[in-house]
Image: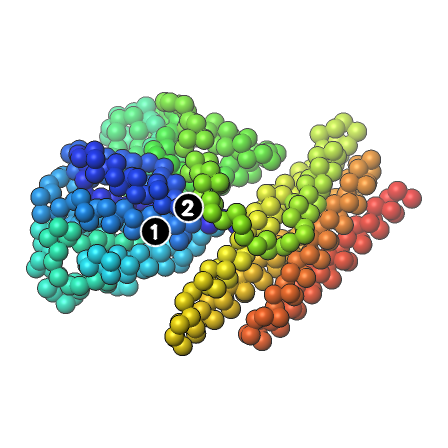
Amino acid sequence: MAKLVECVPNFSEGNNKEVIDALAQAISRTPGCVLLDVDAGASTNRTVYTFVGSPEAVIEGALSAARVAGQLIDMSRHTGEHPRMGALDVCPFVPVMNVSMEECVTCAHVFGQRLAVELGVPVYLYGEAAREESRKALPAIRAGEYEALPEKLAKPEWAPDFGPPTFVPRWGATVTGARTFLIAYNINLLCTKELAHRIALNVREQGRGTDQVAPCRQHARHRASNLLDFETTPLHAVYEEVCRDAEALNLPVVGSQLVGLVPKKAMLDTAEFYIKKEKLFILEEEQKIRLVVSRLGLDSLSPFHPRERIIEYLVQAGEVDRGLQRVLCPAGGFIPVPSQGAALGCMVGLMSYGKRQFEELDPIMRKLIPPFHQAMDELVAMVGAHAFSSYMEAMKLPKSTPEERERRTAAMQQGLKTAVRVPCALAEKVSGLWPALKELARHCNLACKSDIQVGAKMLEAAVFGAYFNVMINLKDITDEKFKLAMTQKISELLEEAKQGSALVLVLLEKRAA
């Protein structure tokens, strides 16, 4: 599955349009990077760029912009309202899709080291990438700002994580790190400032309310907050908490606002909350997004256009993945098979739902259809995963010296393991569908008998293909423990698929007899 990282570099220039545009061009011209937003502030003399791409691409995009900044920005002449300490002041990496925080920490480390080496500047690590607890908070590192750097860099306790402990007047110093996706979220209230403040005290991080909510402004008409971790504190948790407090005070809540971009997962998590709370049956992603817009009142003050506000929708797959089309398929020969098998299961469920003659089946189908619907897109993504990308990249590594050959061999072995894990993960995903498929065979509309029969055999064939893709790559792996574990795992999944498919067919034949 494609990996997506957001990078949000803050450059210390907010007035010179030529410099602002040059930095934007450096990012947008980097292969694999999609520039989403450029937010220039004249009074702060600072511009925040937001772009996304694969982990490797965003590192290159940030470095490209940093090189331009090194030529065009002179910190010795910089003034502005916002705290700052460098030409590239701060550069966080944020996981968006199919990327762990650990991978973003690696992005920060790689970027920081390369920036320090190429430009000869001091670089600090903060947030999740920090190596010292005292450096996790950005304000602690930036204390004293640019003007304090000559004295600060001379202190051993403030030696940079990368680069020289020397003052570079034109540049200053850069802070890079990894953090969760920050969501700016306002909830609209018709009340006084004092009442809004009272509600805010119950929700803010230091109060009795929800964790991972940073306190912001309290206005007469809205309660503003920053969600520091939307997976710990989802949108609906904050909204529902404010609604409860407002109801206790007999105050009206009149919708809410999302400021800037939002990850799709944040919206879908909230959709699932309301689907469960209200016992709804919604399958399509677009309808789930519409539900969230309605329940949170996101269009109460201005229209909410998902295609312009949800980060994944802004990213065209062809742009992020350009240059990656000619890659080896992780499961050659069965690209459409698993997703089509799941699609047939979903179709059979829908053909048995919402009809008067099958009305008694509605509660059952409401439980059985969603797993197949969800699996359709997930299986497509898994089959399209660039399983061999890391292996092919490893083959390009230099091999002139013994050390280089050793690193290349290790990277190739790691790449082969990835090529094995992808089809194995696909087989595991299919494995999770057998219980639902068996239950569907017991209750579905028998007019769809052939569809579910074909679906069962397609899912079995998908695991069959995954098995042989795993086995053909295992032979080149030298880690015997890994080979044994993966052989056992994929063999068990194949046997389970054979038995699951056979049982589905038997159940259907018994019902038809």
Please indicate whether residue 190 sits to the left or right of residue 406 in the image: left
Question: Where residue 72 sits: x, y (%)?
Answer: 18, 44
Badge 2 marks a residue whose secondary structure is: loop
The residue tagged 2 is 32
In the figure, residue 355 lies in which quadrant? top right
Please indicate whether residue 168 sits to the left or right of residue 239 in the image: left
- The label on residue 90 is none
Residue flagged by tag 1: what amino acid is it?
Glu
Question: Where residue 451 sits: x, y (%)?
Answer: 78, 40
Badge 1 marks a residue whose secondary structure is: helix
Q: Is residue 287 above or below residue 507?
A: above
Do the CB atoms of the residues marked 2 and 1 lie less than 8 Å apart? yes
In the figure, residue 121 lies in which quadrant? bottom left
Task: Look at the image and name its color scheme.
Answer: rainbow
Residue flagged by tag 2: what amino acid is it?
Gly
The mark nearer the N terminus, 2 or 1, is 2
